[in-house]
Image (cartoon, rainbow, N blue to C red):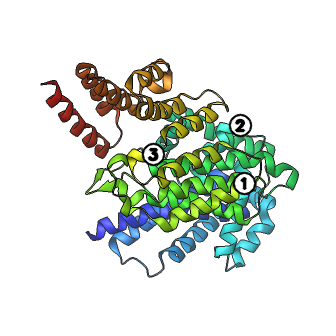
């Protein structure tokens, strides 16, 4: 790997892992009303890192270097602002502390401030969709495009949500704090949903060359564990989500071979990480001790069925179908029905699976979903309708976001063409 490539990889790592930490710490001192300014400071710090490390050696402690630059830029930003007197009057005490404090970016301070940042983003004065978008942007360094993909919407809508969220924070003077117990409960759901979206973006990347972005998945698990250690409400729900992410991540090493995607059916199960898997099983057992059942309990149980099967053919698809039925009790969801269709195909055959798939074909979020068309291909292929299968697969290839996904689908297309001939 060239030096420039190393720098790019390192900067990508820091943008994902350190930007949220820096934003959280700086927001404590400058206040949520100045969140946009803080985001600009962190962005400028990362740009300076790219420029500096490209022409000079990478420092021995890149994190400390970046934190120092961010601190200096924050102080300079205050001095440059035309409204500096107003700013100092609003946050003067905190700024004075920031000038002198040496351990602002200590591990404990970062963790405490990230917790505060989570709850600040989820203030009830901000709409739910904007809350999640704000967490993904500020805490996790998601791009606008990545957030749009998570919401199945466009970049313009996400930009509007973020602008509204920041405006609401300023207007409502949202405090940078962990709320009292009575308010904690109503904010946890949104935080958990955000963490799950972070994991999903890592589990199935929407952009770039990486099929799995393990750093995002690890960050999602870390945030969930941080909530658990904080002893936040919905203890069972937090553990269930943690179990789900651990069980899914335990299969990562078997999902990719030489840059290609390996489907669950063809994975070498000996490559699974059974240490992480056992942690997932343990957390799921603990999460299931009470009577409370969430969607994370159900999804984790589905993953547990896949993990515990000796081989693909012995997977208990009927039980998985029942679990998807329970998920649908939470409300209509075309994505859940799409996943249920795959289980129906395995358990009951292509005829019933096609009926299931046809029930969601007119849903807007399915029209540009390559997984809808790849599933349709599998069904039509099983029915030996090779013309329809080929057409579905062409749509899937066109819509797949990653080259690795396109290559996997193209290999299936060759199989279909051979059968057709």
Residue nearest the viewer, comparing 391 with 345: 345
Residue nearest the viewer, comparing 51 with 15: 15
| Secondary element type, mark 2 | loop
- Looking at marks 2 and 3 on the same chain, the residue that comes earlier in the sequence is marked by 2
At x 77%, y 67%, the residue is 94
Per the model, the C-alpha gap separating discs 1 and 3 is 26 Å
At x 57%, y 52%, the residue is 244
| Secondary element type, mark 3 | loop
Q: Position of residue 320 (x, y in %)?
A: 53, 40
Residue nearest the viewer, comparing 179 with 287: 287
Q: Is residue 152 above or below residue 206?
A: above
Residue nearest the viewer, comparing 190 with 291: 291
Query: Is residue 257 visible from the viewing direction of this image?
Result: yes
Quarter holding residue 328 = top right
Q: Which residue is mark 3?
A: 315
Quarter holding residue 89 = bottom right
**Quadrant (top left/top right/bottom left/bottom right) for the N terminus:** bottom left
Q: Which residue is mark 2?
A: 127
- Looking at marks 1 and 2 on the same chain, the residue that comes earlier in the sequence is marked by 2
Q: Which mark is residue 360?
A: none
At x 53%, y 54%, the residue is 141
Query: Is residue 78 visible from the viewing direction of this image?
Result: no
Q: Which mark is residue 236?
A: 1
At x 30%, y 65%, the residue is 5
Image side of residue 363 versus residue 179, left or right: left
- Looking at marks 1 and 3 on the same chain, the residue that comes earlier in the sequence is marked by 1
């Amino acid at each position: 790997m060239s030096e420039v490539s190393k720098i790019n990889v390192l900067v990508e790592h820091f943008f994902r892992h350190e930007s949220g930490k820096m934003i959280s710490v700086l927001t404590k001192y400058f206040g949520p009303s100045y969140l946009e300014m803080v985001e600009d400071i962190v962005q400028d710090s990362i740009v300076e890192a790219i420029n500096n490390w490209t022409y000079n050696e990478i420092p021995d402690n890149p994190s400390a270097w970046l934190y120092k630059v961010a601190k200096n830029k924050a102080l300079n930003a205050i001095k440059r602002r035309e409204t500096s007197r107003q700013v100092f009057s609003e946050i003067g005490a905190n700024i004075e502390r920031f000038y002198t404090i040496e351990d602002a970016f200590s591990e404990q301070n970062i963790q405490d401030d990230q917790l505060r940042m989570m709850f600040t983003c989820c203030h009830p004065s901000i709409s739910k969709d904007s809350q999640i978008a704000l967490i993904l942007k500020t805490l996790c360094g998601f791009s606008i495009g990545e957030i749009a993909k998570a919401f199945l919407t466009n970049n313009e809508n996400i930009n509007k949500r973020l602008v509204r969220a920041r405006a609401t924070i300023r207007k409502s003077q949202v405090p940078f704090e962990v709320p009292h117990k009575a308010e904690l409960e109503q904010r946890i759901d949104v935080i958990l949903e955000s963490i799950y979206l972070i994991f999903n973006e890592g589990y199935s990347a929407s952009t770039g060359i990486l099929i799995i972005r393990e750093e995002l998945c690890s960050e999602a698990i870390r945030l969930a564990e941080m909530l658990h250690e904080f002893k936040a409400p919905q203890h069972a729900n937090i553990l269930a989500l943690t179990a789900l992410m651990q069980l899914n991540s335990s299969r990562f090493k078997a999902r990719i071979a030489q840059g290609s995607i390996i489907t669950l059916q063809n994975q070498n199960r000996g490559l699974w990480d059974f240490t992480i898997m056992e942690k997932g099983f343990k957390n799921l057992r603990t999460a299931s001790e009470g009577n409370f059942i969430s969607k994370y309990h159900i999804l984790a149980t589905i993953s547990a069925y896949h993990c515990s099967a000796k081989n693909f053919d012995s997977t208990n698809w009927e039980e998985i179908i029942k679990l998807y039925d329970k998920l649908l009790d939470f409300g209509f969801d075309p994505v859940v029905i799409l996943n249920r269709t795959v289980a129906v195909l395995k358990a009951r055959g292509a005829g019933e699976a096609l009926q299931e798939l046809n029930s969601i074909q007119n849903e807007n979020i399915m029209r540009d979903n390559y997984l809808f068309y790849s599933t349709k291909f599998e069904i039509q292929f099983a029915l030996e309708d090779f013309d329809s299968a080929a057409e579905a697969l062409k749509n899937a290839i066109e819509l797949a976001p990653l080259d690795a996904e396109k290559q996997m689908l193209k290999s299936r297309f060759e199989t279909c063409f051979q059968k057709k001939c």
